[in-house]
Image (cartoon, rainbow, N blue to C red):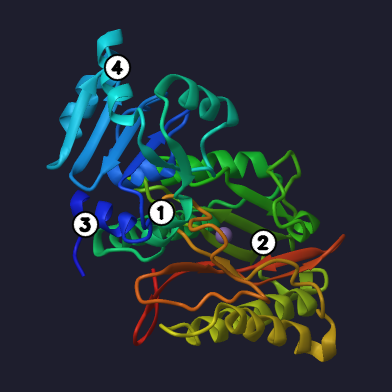
């Protein structure tokens, strides 16, 4: 596997859009993830820019503000148009008028859609979002390298943070320190707002760091990810603050939770390979949790085992390891594997890694 060229990515998208040979990606005040997928730009915001995608090549219509930024990053097969005048806008219009075009309905706001119809007058508009999801579901070597680097940075930051835990520090203080550690280690930005949970807060899977203070014997759960060249990573670690058995309240129960989730995660990961079914992988983890300690944790694993990871943290619409998932794993997919146990009022445990699917089995990134 090698890094795909722009042409190869464009071909990968058009393979799944029969009858469509013209796609218009429309940015809002943020970039369509598919715009990022094709341009691979790592600098610039490109608010309100358009990317016209045809089999012959890709044209970026942007504004004077970022024209130079675009030109510096343009690769072969990419044309950059500076929309500094109404005439240039008409160039875009002439490309679209009377044509059947594909758009990403999962991204274009209704208002932009209406404007597009009114101003650019295409003959018809169809949704091509699924074609992009399919193109993006398997990663090339460069994409994998970036996710691996993000995961490495995140794991390094967790182990560094573990040494800096102090009784009395707040979740917010930890989150601020953790994010700054990741940035220093090479992260461009967090994949999502860093989740930090102390004690009972760990029972809430998406708890946001607040002013809760760390106490001896608390669970400490960190769920975070570093972005490297547009690609996200997503790692969760849970630990106990303080290891002295005698002084940690309900040490045995906490340790059993940690061990159960670890076992569920490693069993599920070892079943991952090309051809395996997403639903089955989820059930491997769920069964271990449900049956452990005579059913003490039955029903406490309350979310999907994993999700596709790439440009978006939840990449690839609907591609999940979940109980009813019909997803069949393919070589080159990257999925999170994140079982958990959540006991409201007491605490929770989650372990999460990013796993590459190959023909021969799993590779933990
Ligand atoms: Mn995740």
Q: Distance between the residues labelled 2 and 3?
A: 49 Å
Give neighbour class at mark 1: few <14, some 14-19, many 20+ (Cα, 10 Å): many
- Of callouts 1 and 3, which one flags the residue occurring earlier in the amino acid sequence? 3
**Residue 106 lies in quadrant:** top right
- Of callouts 3 and 4, which one flags the residue occurring earlier in the amino acid sequence? 3
Q: Is residue 310 visible?
A: no
Q: Which residue is drawn at 60% across and 56% down?
A: 222
Please say if the residues under marks 2 and 3 sit with CB atoms less than 8 Å apart: no
Q: How many marks?
A: 4
- Of circles 2 and 3, the one toward us is 3
- Of circles 4 and 1, the one toward us is 4
Q: Is mark 1 within 8 Å of ligand 1?
A: no
Give neighbour class at mark 3: few <14, some 14-19, many 20+ (Cα, 10 Å): few
Please say if the residues under marks 1 and 3 sit with CB atoms less than 8 Å apart: no
Give neighbour class at mark 4: few <14, some 14-19, many 20+ (Cα, 10 Å): some
Q: Name the residue under label 3.
A: 8
Q: Mark 4 points at which residue?
A: 90
162 on left or right of 300: left
Q: Mark 2 points at which residue?
A: 241
Asked which secondary structure carries label 3, the reply is: helix
Q: Name the residue under label 1.
A: 132
Asked which secondary structure carries label 4, the reply is: helix
Asked which secondary structure carries label 1, the reply is: helix
Q: Which residue is drawn at 78% across and 63% down?
A: 347
- Of callouts 2 and 3, which one flags the residue occurring earlier in the amino acid sequence? 3
**Quadrant of the rendered image holding ligand 1:** bottom right
* On screen, residue 46 above or below 58: above
């Amino acid at each position: 596997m090698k890094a795909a060229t722009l042409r190869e990515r464009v071909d990968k998208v058009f393979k799944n859009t029969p009858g469509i040979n013209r796609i218009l990606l429309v940015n809002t005040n943020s970039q369509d993830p598919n715009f990022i997928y094709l341009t691979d730009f790592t600098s610039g915001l490109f608010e309100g820019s358009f990317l016209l995608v045809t089999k012959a090549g890709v044209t970026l219509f942007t504004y004077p503000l970022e024209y130079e930024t675009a030109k510096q990053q343009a690769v072969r097969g990419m044309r950059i148009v500076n929309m500094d005048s109404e005439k240039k806008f008409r160039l875009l219009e002439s490309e679209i008028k009377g044509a059947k075009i594909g758009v990403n309905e999962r991204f274009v706001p209704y208002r932009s859609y209406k404007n597009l119809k009114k101003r650019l007058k295409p003959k018809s508009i169809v949704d091509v979002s699924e074609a992009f999801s399919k193109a993006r579901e398997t990663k090339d070597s460069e994409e994998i390298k970036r996710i691996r680097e993000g995961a490495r940075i995140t794991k390094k930051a967790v182990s560094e943070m573990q040494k800096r835990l102090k009784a009395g520090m707040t979740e917010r203080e930890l989150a601020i320190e953790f994010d700054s550690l990741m940035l220093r280690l090479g992260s461009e930005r967090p994949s999502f707002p860093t989740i930090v949970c102390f004690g009972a807060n760990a029972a809430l899977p998406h708890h946001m760091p607040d002013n809760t203070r760390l106490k001896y014997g608390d669970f400490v759960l960190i769920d975070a990810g570093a972005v490297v060249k547009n690609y996200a990573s997503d790692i969760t670690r849970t630990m106990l603050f303080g290891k002295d058995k005698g002084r940690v309240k309900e040490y045995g129960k906490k340790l059993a939770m940690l061990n159960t989730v670890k076992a569920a995660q490693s069993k599920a990961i070892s079943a991952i390979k090309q051809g395996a079914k997403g639903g089955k992988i989820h059930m491997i983890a769920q069964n271990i949790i449900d049956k452990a300690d005579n059913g003490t944790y039955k029903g406490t694993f309350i979310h999907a085992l994993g999700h596709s990871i790439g440009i978006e943290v939840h990449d690839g619409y609907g591609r999940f390891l979940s109980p009813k998932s019909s997803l069949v794993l393919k070589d080159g997919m990257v999925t999170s594997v994140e079982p958990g146990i959540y006991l409201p009022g007491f605490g929770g445990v989650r372990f999460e890694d990013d796993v590459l699917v190959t023909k021969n089995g799993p590779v933990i990134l």
